[in-house]
Image: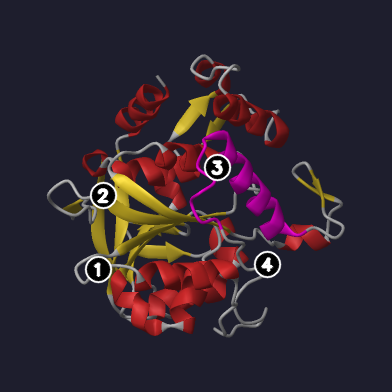
Amino acid sequence: MIAATCCFPCYGQQQKVWVDADSGNETDDIYALFRLLGEPSIKLVGVSSAHFNNADLVAFEKWNQYATKGINTAAISQQLNEDLLKAMGKLSIPHPLGADRQMGRAWGGKEARSSDAAKGIIEAVKKLTKNEKLVVISLGALTNIASAISLDNSIAQKIVCYALGAKYNIEKGAWNKSEFNIRNDLNAFDYLLDNPSVDLVLMPTNIAFPYQFKKDYLYKFLKDDVPVEKMLKQRWEETNPQDTIRTLWDLALVEAFVKPTFATISRVQTPPENTQRLIKVYNKINVQLMKNDFLQYLK
């Protein structure tokens, strides 16, 4: 076990970060983006949109509040990303559209899914100085980051990929890939696991699960006269109005990233079906400290 560490550079230099978010899927993505957009220790160099394609889209008439007929999930995420950036006066940050479907095909395959997002990540890496790395925080399906590396593998060693997904039993050393983000592009997850050049830091959903907020309590900190804070409340009401308490999964990963002393990481073996190597996996988060930090950020 090792204490969580991030790759913030020394001497007060801001860490360059790219966020890839399936913001249209549910409540938590825009909370995570909101937290990062105001974090002084980082420089956000890109915000891309991830799809949230899943089997329910062809079996049911609605997904959350969206009609599934003709749905373009990446476009929904893109619009929400743009709305949040506009509300925070940050539209100057590049915000390209991501892929509208997984890498490869339903039966497998690791063919890249090219998109403006994948090309944007490659371009951002090419602009780094010799000693810099780009942190890519993936909050949904891993299509865009995996495709970027597949299109130009030379960027792999210049990237640290933080991702929310899968489940991991620390005591048993057992993986479970049956999780929403991973199911939406298992091919991309396998591609990253199999690529020894990829520095992967994973927050399993079973570790993030306890990071929960009560709606009524959180709303006390969100002001209707502040457009972005009003947007956070509206997002909860639009997507999960029936929930009086929710896990804010993506915000858990972001808080662990910006406050590395609030979490711990283990180096663990990749699943047996993948290339055998060690990757970093969060094994514990301090829920209360992370919640306090977000509420303090709101103040």
Quarter of the picture containing the C terminus is: top left
Q: Which residue is mark 3?
A: 85
* 84 part of magenta stretch: yes
Residue at image point 34% right, 69% down: 127
- Majority secondary structure of magenta residues: helix
Earlier sequence position, callout 3 versus callout 2: 2
Q: Up-down: is 293 above or below 147?
A: above
Pick out the residue farthest to the left: 11
Q: Residues within 10 Å of mark 4 (few under 14, many from 20)?
A: many
Question: Label 3, label 2: how many angstroms apart (C-alpha)?
Answer: 20 Å
Looking at the rendered structure, the kind of residue marked 1 is Thr
Looking at the rendered structure, the kind of residue marked 3 is Leu
Left or right of 41 on screen, residue 81: right
Quarter of the picture containing the N terminus is: bottom left
Q: Residues within 10 Å of mark 3 (few under 14, many from 20)?
A: many
Q: Which residues are magenta?
A: 72-95
Residue at image point 67% right, 70% down: 101
Q: Up-down: is 83 above or below 1?
A: above
